[in-house]
Image (cartoon, helix red, strand yellow):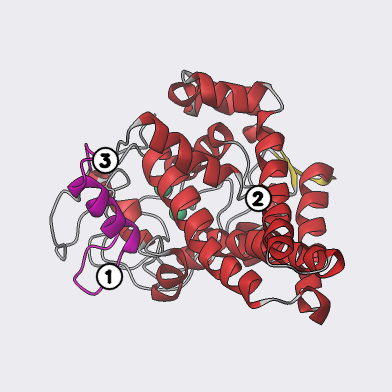
Amino acid sequence: MRNQPPPVGQTLPRRHLPLPAAVDRRRLLWSYAITVGFHHLVALLALMPWFFSWTGVILAIAGTFVFGALGINLGYHRMLTHRGVSFPKWLEYAFVVLGVCSMQDTPARWVAVHRRHHEHSDRQEDPHSPLVNFFWGHVGWMLVDNRDLVRLGIYDRYAKDILRDPFYRRLERTLLYPTIILSSWALFFLGGFGAALLAGDPIGTAAQFGASLLIWGVFARTVLVWHITWLVNSAAHLWGYQNYETGDDSRNNWFVAVLTSGEGWHNNHHADPRSARHGHRPWEVDLIYQFIRGMEALGLAWDVARPAKASVPSRRRSTDVRPPQT
Ligand SMILES: [Zn+2]
Ligand SMILES: [Zn+2]
């Protein structure tokens, strides 16, 4: 069921999509549902005064950039999924480890699902189009069984290049993925606990400070980064403006762009998926691209893919869109 793109200059009328045919809504994916529910519940502890510390709050806010923008948006998305920029291997792995700590699945799976999204954007086969409904595009899609997303099938089709790397294979096949996540939890707690002990605090106060960093710096931040990432899939396919006729409902949404450090210029991204620069017009601030430029100036980034046209405005047909890089 492929929708033809509208003539250039016309905006798509809002459509309603059925669920992907391969989805079985009655089959809840318990591991995902429990993980998402558990994190939201634990994150609520941040509201209890006992767990409050300004250090924790600062770590949560800074963490949305470090783990969300650098780990997911730069590492998983622009670097791995679209190959829009290359880094030395040690730095590539560092970004991916930050992505792993964001608990958005392994890099191979994230990449495969996202490449499928680009291939079928806002058509029935799209794994998470909000044209089904907002909740589905935001989070619902990952909580129920979708035979299209069975790991071996999508890996073979969308993530072969990722799995050629032994580190990414190990994240699939060994306990390395949960080990990294649990180690990051321990680091936050023990970092706070140890620092407070060194500062001369009694053990109970030190434990309270460690717990505060764990609740704010890990759980509240993880939930925050989840919703920020999910808004790209939901809000940035519903609300905002289009620079390009891409044949899908991707939008440039300034609010999402601010939260994601640049990923909200999502219509630009769908028009030119490989480009490492998502902000095309002068006011479309793209902090992640500025970060990439900084790394490039230091000699730490190369092969930076830039938009086909430096600063945009002439409209292009979706036929000009490059296919997902597989
Ligand atoms: Zn999209
Ligand atoms: Zn993308």
Where is residue 283? Give x, y as percent: 24, 75
Q: Quadrant of residue 226?
A: bottom right
Q: Quadrant of the C terminus?
A: top left
Residue type at mark 2 is Leu
Amino acid type, label 1? Glu
Which mark identifies residue 284? Answer: 1
Q: Give the number of the disc on residue 19.
A: 2
Mark 1 vs ligand 2: CB under 8 Å?
Answer: no
Front position in the image: 136 or 5 = 136
> Which residue shows up at 63% across the image and 53% down it?
18
Q: Which residue is mark 3?
A: 300
Q: Which numbered dot is residue 178? A: none
Does the magenta portion include 294? yes
Tell me the quarter of the picture where residue 77 sits: top left
Question: Is any atom of residue 125 visible in this view?
Answer: no
Q: Position of residue 142 (x, y in %)?
A: 69, 48
Along the horizontal axis of the image, is 217 left or right of 112? Answer: right
First of labels 2, 3 by sequence position:
2
- Is tag 3's residue or tag 1's residue first in the polypeptide sequence? 1
Would you call the spot at circle 3 few (<14 residues within 10 Å), some (14-19), or many (20 or more)?
Answer: some
Looking at the image, residue 225 lies above or below residue 164: below
Residue 153 location (% of width, % of height) = 60, 24
Which residue is at a point 66% across and 34% down the rendered structure image?
177
Q: What kind of element bears circle 3? A: loop
Report crowding for label 1: few under 14, some 14 to 19, many 20 or more residues within 10 A (C-alpha). Answer: some
As measured in the structure, the alpha-carbon distance from the residue carrying label 2 to the one carrying label 3 is 43 Å
Name the foreground residue: 102 vs 50.
Answer: 50
Please report whichever mark, 1 or 2, sits nearer to the chain's N-terminal start: 2
Would you say 325 lies left or right of 53 here?
Answer: left
